[in-house]
Image (cartoon, grey):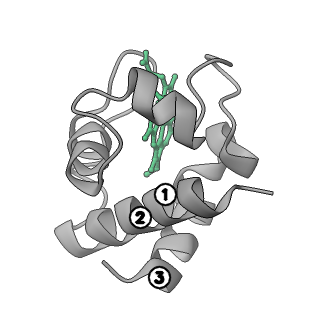
Amino acid sequence: GDVGNGETVFNANCAACHAGGQNVIMPDKTLEKEALEKYLAGGRNEAAVRTQVTNGKNAMPAFGGRLDDDQIADVAAYVIATSEEGWD
Ligand code: HEM
């Protein structure tokens, strides 16, 4: 995935709930490294992010009908890379 384009996709589609890698609806379920390791189904990896973005989970909407496969791959690459670097 293209991390730079992933940042654009993130800002347009995810930041409303996940600004700064946080989670305004379920505050423990952030996009920080430790939270992804603890909570993300399938572990902290791009495939697991792609699955959750495509299908949604509970209060998180599904993006499978709104973003194409390349956009989902790019945003997953951005989330994993930024979780490694730190969101701030
Ligand atoms: C959880 C990514 C959009 C609400 C998560 C998680 C990821 C993620 C990776 C797992 C985090 C964890 O369990 O610690 C994204 C991406 C988005 C996006 C890449 C854009 C394509 C949104 C939006 C909302 C939202 C727009 C709010 C309307 C949530 C909620 C959870 C969550 C509530 C917790 C779900 C649960 O386990 O019950 N998100 N998200 N997300 N996200 Fe998103």
Label 2 beta carbon less than 8 Å to ligand 1: yes
The mark nearer the N terminus, 3 or 1, is 3
What amino acid is found at the position of numbered circle 3 in the picture? Asn
**Extreme residue toward the right, this view:** 88
- Rendered residue at 18%/67% (across/down): 69
Q: Where is residue 43? Give x, y as percent.
A: 29, 35
Q: Quadrant of the N terminus?
A: bottom left
What amino acid is found at the position of numbered circle 2 in the picture? Val
Determine the CA span between mark 3 and mark 1: 12 Å
Q: Quadrant of residue 29?
A: top right
Q: Secondary structure at mark 1?
A: helix
Q: Are marks 2 and 1 in contact (CB under 8 Å)?
A: yes
Q: Quadrant of residue 34?
A: top right
Which residue matches tag 1? Answer: 79
Q: Nearer the viewer, residue 66 or 21?
A: 21
Left/right placement of residue 71 relative to residue 37 reads left
- Rendered residue at 32%/46% (across/down): 49
Would you call the spot at circle 2 few (<14 residues within 10 Å), some (14-19), or many (20 or more)? many
Left/right placement of residue 46 relative to residue 31 reads left
Q: Where is residue 20? Give x, y as percent.
A: 74, 50
Which residue matches tag 2? Answer: 75
Determine the CA span between mark 3 and mark 2: 7 Å
Label 1 beta carbon less than 8 Å to ligand 1: yes
Which residue matches tag 3? Answer: 5
- Rendered residue at 41%/64% (across/down): 75
What amino acid is found at the position of numbered circle 1 in the picture? Val
